[in-house]
Structure formats: C-alpha cells, structure tokens
Image (cartoon, rainbow, N blue to C red):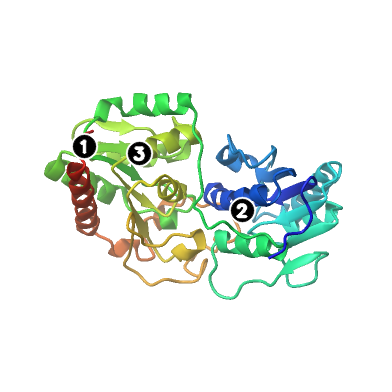
Amino acid sequence: MNALPLDGRKILVIVYGHIADTMAAIPGLRSLRHAYPGARIDALVIHGAAPVLSGCPYVDDVVAWDDFRQKGTRWAKAEKAATIASLGLRIRRRRYDAVLVFHRSFRAIRELAALSGAQVVAGVSSGRDRYTHRVEPPHGVHSSREENRAVLAAIGVEDDGRPPELWTSPDDEARALELLAPVRGWPLVGLHPGSDWSCQQWLPDRFAAVGRELRARLAARIVITGSRSEMPLQREIAAGLDGPVAETAGVTTLGQLVALLRRLDLLITVNSAPASIAQAVGTPTVVLLGAEDPRLTGLTSTERVELIQRGDRLAPGSWCELGRWGVLSGCDSPICRGVSGLDQLEASDVVATAMRILSSTRDARSSVGVER
C-alpha cells in the first residue's frame, strides 16, 4: 500500500458526529500522523464533540463549528445551505492540500469537502461528487471505524488496528477522585441511564433495582453518570437506592467523566457515549440494547464488554412510531423509555450478568493481590 505524497502538506479530516463517532476517528488520525509525521493535520468537528480531541497529539488544530440546529423544521434546508457555505469559505481560506471525509458522509458534508478547494478529496461517495479518491458506499452494517479505515485505504494509508485513546489531565483525575470520595470501596459500579434517544433508555426503576440488589449482595458502591439534561433520570434512580450514591450527572467535563469511568469496577449503561469510553479505557461494561444494531457504533461482546439484547434487532429508525429518528439529533420523549426490546429486559437479567463479571474481576484482583 503506497500512501499519497502528503507529508509536509496540509490535511483536513472532517469528523461529523457526537462523542462516540469522534472517538472512532482517533485511530484514523493516529494512522495519518504515523504515515505523515511532517504534515499539518487538522480535524473539523462539531463543538459538542471537540473535547474528545483535547490533548490529542495527532492533530495540530481542532476546528469546531455549531451543528445544524433546525433539523426537522421548515428552516432546515436554508440553515444547512447557509452553514455549509460559511463553513466552506472558512476552510477554503486555510488552503488544505487534502480533505478526508470520515464517516457520516451525507450530502451536506460532501458538498463541504468539494468547497474546500483541496486537490485531494477522499471519502465515501456514489460517484456524483468531486472526490478524487472515492470509496464505494458500504453494503450491510459498517461501523464508523470501518468506514474510516476504507477512506484511509483510498489514499494508501493503513489503519493501525489499535483501539481509540482518550486523554485526561491531572485536574481531571483529581476531580474524579473528589466525586468518588463518598463511595470508595469495592465494587464500584456505575449506572449510566441516559442517551440522546429515549427509546435507547431503560426504565429508571429497573436501574434502581439493579443497584439495590448489587448493594445487598456485594455491598456495591453506586455511581450515577450523565449529562446535565439527564439529571432528572439520576434523581429518579437515586431515590430508589438506599445508602450513599455518587450523583455525578451534569457536574463532569468529558475529561473528568473519562477519569471517573476508568476507576469503575463495572459500568452498566445503555447504548450511549460512556459505553464507547469505557471500552476505550478498559472498564468492564454491560451494555443494555433495544432494537438498535450495536455494530453501527462498533460495540461487540468481548472479554470486558457484555451486550444484553432481548428483542429483535431492527434497521435504524424503523421502530420510531413518532417519525423522529433520522430527523432530529435526539429525542427525550419519556413515553419511549423501555420500549423496542428493552421492555423485555428485567433487572434480574442485568444483576446476573453483573455478578458474573464482578466475580471474575474479583478473582483476578485477588490472584495478583490487588486491593482497592
């Protein structure tokens, strides 16, 4: 595989998506840096995902922009055209030699790549775009990481096959320890109930039942994580638990959340960004799935990741009776919690899986004399 002669040149990588998608771009950025150590490599990301690349040694600059805000409204088309035109001018002024469009190569992003004026443009395209190095749209289910690998191959760069990395500061580590101070001990179990989509959320009372049972059986210390918008979910779950709980939803930066998740003995989460973060930092994880296909976010069962899915796996969007999937950036309709197969998932199922994983990790810790 012969890489294009781009060392010493300016490369822009367009990464459209939220935290998990941006994490999936890190191995690609790392592989680019290895192939082109003397190049200037910038990453274009939306503001909400920019912290993922904070401290990333593989990029020279993170160019952030505001995501489309009018999705699903009558003004969506006009907003998209204006945003792409403005952003296109912004990156054209930077005079990039190459633009790579990682995953999520939909029409607006392909138009943006064409507006860049770069001599080399690579990405997934059916052939109607001005791409110089085109990747055929994938057949079947492909994760963001797999699509990125194909885009790299189009310019002769091989993905290094290594997992994503995340970077934290000493302040992040100190804050994580501070937040966990009220619940120190073994096992430290995190509950993450929130997702951008309520149809990917399990019921709060069942999360609470899991926490109570693990506390009764193992004296588990419970930590609840989430964003500011997920604080109501946190309150519901915490109200159903006895004893101290570390309620960290809405009070952590991304770096602090990474540091916190790294210290857990187990994370129990729905299909949300913390599942990908925990996988990256090696935290044992139980992921609760509805009808979504976990392969889209690169989630598979491994030695440290257990997926629980009781219902049928459906195509993305096909289960949304409200017609919101694929139109909005998220939906927080409470009536959709615990549906699409998640309704078939009982607390006892999750407790049994958690007990098995914690027993295994306890035995491993004991064998090497590790104490918390």
Is residue 111 among what the camera can see? no
Q: Which of the two marks, 1 or 2, is nearer to us in this view?
A: 2
Whole-percent x, y for residue 301 in the image? 36, 62
Which residue is under mark 2?
Answer: 28
* Mark 1–mark 2 distance (CA, rounded to whole Å): 36 Å
Residue 13 in view here = yes
Query: Residue tagged by mark 1?
Result: 186
Q: Which of the marked residues, 2 or 3, is nearer the chain's N terminus?
A: 2
Distance CA(mark 2)–CA(mark 3): 35 Å
- Name the residue carrying label 3: 234
Mark 1 vs 2, N-terminal side: 2
- Mark closer to the chain start, 3 or 1: 1
Q: Is residue 248 above or below residue 300?
A: above
Query: Circles 2 and 3: CB distance less than 8 Å?
Result: no
Three-letter residue code for mark 1: Trp
Mark 3 Cα shell of 10 Å, populated few (<14), some (14-19), many (≥20) = many
Regarding mark 3 in the picture, which secondary structure is present there?
A: helix
